[in-house]
Amino acid sequence: MSTVQAGPAGVTIGRRSLQQLHAILDRHAGAEAALLLREIGFATGGELFEGFERWVAEQFHVAGPRELDSQFLSEALSGFFAGTGWGQVAVSELTPSVLALDMAEWAEAEPGGAEYPSCHFSSGMLADFFTRLGGTQAAVMEVECLSRGETRCRFLVGSPDVLTFVYERITAGMDYRQALGI
């Protein structure tokens, strides 16, 4: 993804453009950059989900994503996100109330030595996307990141209450796996 283009999810921006957005906000907004990127990402989730609805209808011949058998959800998400330039996604259930989204390559991640997970735009975008997919408020938190030198980006998807619980445990020094009891 290197240019602005029209695609199945509407207008998409290129990887370099997204990285430039990060750099500009980091330079001019400092500590607020992460929050701003999440808000911008959240604003894109609706159109992205509409593109996913159309794509699922075409690829799987069902009325919409909620009509998919759960065994095909990971395949559908991976195919859609790969096709729109973000990268392939593997979905797994960590607990009955938390999904993991794993990406070995992800458009927003810049491999390097970041101190914290830094795919903030994606966190916001995926929160709105999964809220629409599930029909109830979803929260998304990145817990592993290629930008931190890890082997994948991993996002947790769950209710705001559950992920707030996990976040509080992480800030107290606990690993997210321990916080989830896995």
Image (tube, helix red, strand yellow):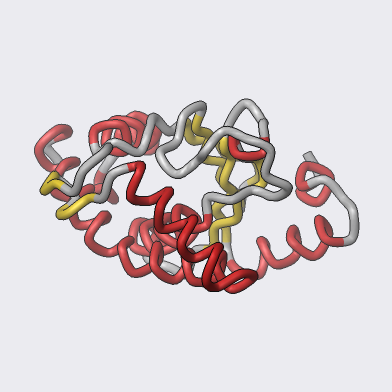
Quarter residue 76 falls in: top left
Say if residue 36 shows up in the picture: yes
Say if residue 64 shows up in the picture: no
Query: Going by the picture, which residue comes out furthest to the front?
Result: 27
- x then y, percent, for residue 177: 77, 42
For the image, the number of numbered tags is: 0
Quarter residue 55 falls in: top left
Quadrant of image for the C terminus: top right
- x then y, percent, for residue 64: 19, 50
Query: Going by the picture, which residue comes out furthest to the right?
Result: 173
**Residue 33 position (above or below residue 122):** below
Question: What residue is rendered at 25% in x and 46% in y?
Answer: 67
Please give left or right for residue 45 compared with residue 140 in the image.
left
Please give left or right for residue 54 compared with residue 31 in the image.
left
**Residue 140 position (above or below residue 83):** below
- x then y, percent, for residue 178: 84, 45
Question: What residue is rendered at 35% in x and 43% in y?
Answer: 16
Q: Which residue is at the front of the view, 45 or 145?
A: 145
Question: What residue is rendered at 67% in x and 38% in y?
Answer: 148
- x then y, percent, for residue 98: 60, 50
Please give left or right for residue 97 compared with residue 51 in the image.
right
Quadrant of image for the N terminus: top left
Question: What residue is rendered at 46% in x and 29% in y?
Answer: 105
Please give left or right for residue 112 compared with residue 37 in the image.
right
**Residue 168 position (above or below residue 4):** below
